Image (tube, rainbow, N blue to C red):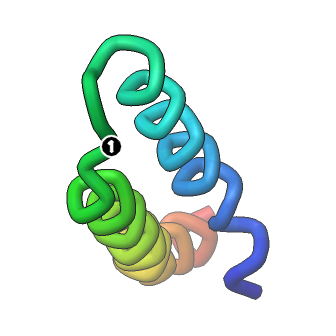
Amino acid sequence: MFKKYLRLPIFVFIFLLLKQIIFDDGIDWGYTTVFPIFLYIGYIAWEWINIPYNWKENNNK
């Protein structure tokens, strides 16, 4: 279930890592790892919040 939500955080992690490798002197591992984790949790929460809304929409039809 949670595997389908991993694409965006992995893409963001790779993007931030490559950006820091190319443009910065070093890699800030805290920011590079914590931001995609929060993004993953937020994405799961967003999908979980939308379930009752979608269920209500389907019942009205």
User: Residue at the spot x=66%, y=65% of the render?
Assistant: 6
User: Residue at the spot x=52%, y=68% of the render?
Assistant: 54
Q: Quadrant of residue 16?
A: top left
Answer above or below: position of 38 versus 9.
Answer: below
Q: Nearer the viewer, residue 58 or 26?
A: 26
Which corner quadrant holds the N terminus? bottom right
Q: Nearer the viewer, residue 33 or 4?
A: 33
Q: Nearer the viewer, residue 61 or 24?
A: 24
User: Residue at the spot x=37%, y=64% of the render?
Assistant: 33
Q: Secondary structure at mark 1?
A: loop
Q: In the rendering, at what x and y percent does residue 23 appear? A: 34, 12
Q: In the rendering, at what x and y percent does residue 56 appear? A: 46, 76
Q: In the rendering, at what x and y percent does residue 5 appear? A: 64, 66
**Position of 1 compared to 42: left or right?**
right
Residue type, mark 1 in image: Ile
Q: Is residue 53 visible?
A: no
User: Residue at the spot x=76%, y=76% of the render?
Assistant: 3
Which corner quadrant holds the C terminus? bottom right
Answer above or below: position of 42 versus 59.
Answer: above
**Position of 42 compared to 15: left or right?**
left
> Looking at the image, which residue sits at the far top?
23
Q: Nearer the viewer, residue 43 or 59?
A: 43
The crowding category of the residue bearing disc 1, from other C-alpha atoms within 10 Å (few below 14, some 14 to 19, many at least 20), is some
Count of picture labels: 1
Q: Is residue 14 visible?
A: yes
State the residue position of label 1. Answer: 27
Q: Quadrant of residue 21?
A: top left
